[in-house]
Image (cartoon, helix red, strand yellow):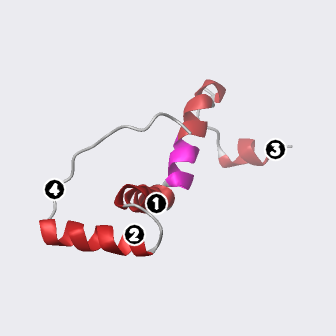
Amino acid sequence: MAMLKNITLSADPELIELARKKAAKENSTLNAQFRNWLEQYISSDRPAINYESLMDKLDYGQPGKKFSRTEMNER
């Protein structure tokens, strides 16, 4: 696992306490629950992020011109 980075969040103290109690009942911590939430939050964007990363790596393969329909269908 990569080195974790600390962040500061602000929330209602009562909500924080309730969340800590709920996490404890689940044999977890509020930090662990937040990390799980963060992972789920970005998971729907991962395919797009991976696609963009792949396209950046493949940018050397540009054809240099726009092909006509006929040229694209030639074999």
Q: CA distance from mark 2 to mark 3?
A: 64 Å
Quadrant of the snapshot with the C terminus:
top right
Q: Amino acid at mark 4?
A: Ser
Residue drawn at x 25%, y 74% is: 18
Q: Which mark is residue 24?
A: 2
Query: Which residue is identified by label 4?
Result: 10
User: Sequence-wise, which precedes: disc 3 or disc 1?
Assistant: 1
Q: Amino acid at mark 2?
A: Ala
Asked whether, in this view, residue 56 is left or right of residue 38, the answer is right
Distance from the alpha carbon under mark 2 to that under mark 1: 15 Å
Query: Do callouts 3 and 1 mark residues in contact (Cβ within 8 Å)?
Result: no
Which stretch is magenta?
A: 46-52
Q: Nearer the viewer, mark 4 or mark 2?
A: 2
Residue drawn at 51 percent across, 47 percent down: 49
Return the residue at label 3: 74
Indicate whether 48 appears above or below 13: above
The part of the image, by quadrant, that contains residue 28 is: bottom left
Q: Identity of the amino acid at label 1?
A: Asn
At a point 22% along the width and 69% down the height, the residue shown is 17
Question: Residue 43 location in percent, x, y?
Answer: 50, 59
